[in-house]
C-alpha cells in the first residue's frame, strides 16, 4: 500500500512538471518567441529604463510625494491616435517591429501640446543626502520649476533618472497599451519650442557645473545620480531627436517598436548615450530604425561631448558586419576618449526595491509577453 502511494505521488509530480513544461513551450510558440532567440544570461541591463541605478541605500532619500502641481494640469482627451497591427511571424526578420504581434499606436496627427497626467517626473526618487547642500537645493528648486518639468520636460532624464517613467513603461508593456508613452514622446519631442528649450537646458547644464550648485559633487565623482543627470542634460537635444524617429515601413515611433520587440537587441541602442556598450553577443536588426538611430548618433558625436563616439562606432561596426558595410556611415564618426561604463544583472540586486521591481517586471514582460 505504501509502495503504491509513493509511486502515485511520484507519477503525479512527473505529470505536473511535464504539463508545466509543455504549457511553457506552447506559450512561447503562441507568442512566436523561439527559445533560441532569448538568452536570459545575456540580458545585462534593463531595456531603455533607468540605466544608472544608485548602488547604495543612502543614494535614495527624498521622494517627491507632492503632486499638488499635477492636480492643476488639464488632461487632453486625444482622439488623433491611430493604430497599426504588427504582423506575426515565425522567422527572424530584419525589422524589429516584426517580432511584435500586438498593435502599437501611430504618432498623433498633431503634436501633443499638453501632457496627460500623471506626468512622469525626472529625479523623482533620486535626491540623495550624499549630495552637498548646494546641490540638493539646486535640484529641488529645479524640480519645482514649471518650465523644466512641463514646458521643456527632458525625455533624456526620464530614461535615466525617473522611477515614475520606469513604472509607466512597465505598465504599458504589461497591459499592451502604449498610448500614454506614445503621447509622451510626441509631447517631449515637439519642435514648436525647440530652440527656447535647448537654450534653457544648456543654461541648466552650465549651472549644474557651478561649485555653488553641483560642481563639487561632480568633481568628487561619487554620486551616480548627479553624473547621470549631467550626462542626460548634455544629451537632451540628441535624445529629443532620436525619440522622434519613425519606422519608415510602419509609421510607428522607433522607440515603441524597440521596447515592445521580443528581441532586446534594438532597445540596447538606446543605452549608448548613457555610456553603456552593446552586450557582447547582441546584434541589432537591419531595420530602418537601427540605421536612423545610429546615423543620428554619428551626426551628434562632434557636437555632443556627453556622447561616447567610441561606443557609437563600435555599435555601428557590429551592425555593418551583420547588415552590410554601407548600412550605416562609419566615416562620419570622430572617436572620443570618453570612458565607457558597463552594467550587469548582478548590479540590479544592489538597487532599492522600487527601482528593482520596475526593472524586473519590464525585463520579464519583454521576454515572455
Image (spheres, rainbow, N blue to C red):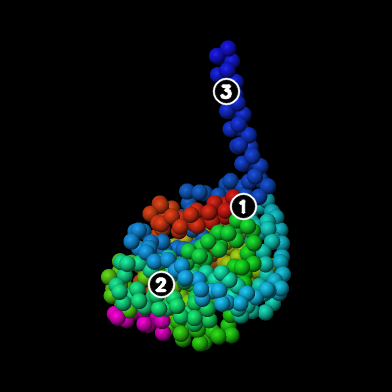
Viewer-closest of 65 and 347: 65
In magenta stretch: residue 159: no
Give me the residue at 61% from left, 36% from top.
20
Q: Is residue 253 left or right of residue 70?
A: right
Q: Earlier in the sequence, mark 2 or mark 3?
A: 3
Q: Is residue 42 left or right of residue 219?
A: right
Viewer-closest of 40 and 20: 20
Viewer-closest of 85 and 181: 181
Which residue is denoted by mark 2 in the rendering?
229
Circles 1 and 2 in contact, beta carbons < 8 Å: no
Give the magenta range.
203-212
Q: Is residue 29 left or right of residue 304?
A: right
Please determine whether, in this image, residue 355 is positioned above or below residue 120: above
In magenta stretch: residue 211: yes
In percent of width and height, residue 93 lies at 64, 57
Which residue is denoted by mark 1 in the rendering?
369
Amino acid at each position: 500500500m505504501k509502495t503504491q502511494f509513493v509511486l502515485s505521488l511520484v507519477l503525479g509530480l512527473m505529470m505536473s512538471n511535464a504539463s508545466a513544461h509543455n504549457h511553457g513551450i506552447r506559450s512561447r510558440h503562441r507568442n512566436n518567441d523561439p527559445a533560441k532567440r532569448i538568452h536570459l544570461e545575456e540580458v545585462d541591463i534593463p531595456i531603455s529604463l533607468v540605466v544608472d541605478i544608485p548602488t547604495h541605500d543612502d543614494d535614495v532619500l527624498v521622494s517627491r510625494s507632492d503632486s499638488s502641481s499635477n492636480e492643476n494640469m488639464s488632461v487632453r482627451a486625444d482622439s488623433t491616435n491611430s493604430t497599426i497591427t504588427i504582423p506575426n511571424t515565425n522567422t527572424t526578420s530584419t525589422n524589429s517591429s516584426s517580432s511584435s504581434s500586438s498593435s502599437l499606436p501611430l504618432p498623433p496627427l498633431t503634436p501633443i501640446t499638453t501632457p496627460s497626467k500623471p506626468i512622469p517626473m525626472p529625479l523623482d526618487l533620486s535626491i540623495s543626502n550624499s549630495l552637498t547642500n548646494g546641490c540638493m537645493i539646486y535640484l529641488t528648486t529645479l524640480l519645482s520649476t514649471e518650465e523644466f518639468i512641463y514646458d521643456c520636460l527632458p525625455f533624456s532624464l526620464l530614461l535615466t533618472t525617473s522611477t515614475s517613467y520606469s513604472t509607466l513603461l512597465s505598465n504599458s508593456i504589461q497591459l499592451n497599451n502604449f498610448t500614454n508613452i506614445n503621447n509622451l514622446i510626441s509631447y517631449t519631442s515637439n519642435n514648436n519650442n525647440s530652440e527656447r528649450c535647448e537654450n534653457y537646458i544648456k543654461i541648466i547644464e552650465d549651472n549644474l557645473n557651478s561649485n555653488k550648485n553641483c560642481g563639487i559633487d561632480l568633481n568628487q565623482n561619487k554620486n551616480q545620480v548627479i553624473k547621470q543627470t549631467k550626462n542626460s542634460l548634455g544629451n537632451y537635444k540628441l535624445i529629443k531627436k532620436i525619440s522622434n524617429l519613425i519606422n519608415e515601413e510602419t509609421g510607428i515611433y522607433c522607440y515603441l517598436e524597440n521596447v515592445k520587440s521580443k528581441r532586446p537587441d534594438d532597445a540596447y541602442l538606446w543605452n549608448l548615450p548613457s555610456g553603456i556598450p552593446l552586450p557582447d553577443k547582441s546584434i541589432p536588426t537591419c531595420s530602418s530604425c537601427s540605421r536612423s538611430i545610429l546615423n543620428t548618433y554619428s551626426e551628434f558625436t562632434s557636437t555632443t561631448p556627453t556622447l561616447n563616439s567610441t561606443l557609437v562606432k563600435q555599435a555601428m561596426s557590429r551592425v555593418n558586419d551583420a547588415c552590410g558595410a554601407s548600412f550605416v556611415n562609419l566615416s562620419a564618426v570622430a572617436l572620443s576618449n570618453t570612458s565607457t561604463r558597463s552594467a550587469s544583472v548582478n548590479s540590479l540586486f544592489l538597487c532599492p526595491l522600487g527601482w528593482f521591481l520596475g526593472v524586473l517586471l519590464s525585463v520579464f514582460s519583454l521576454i515572455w509577453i
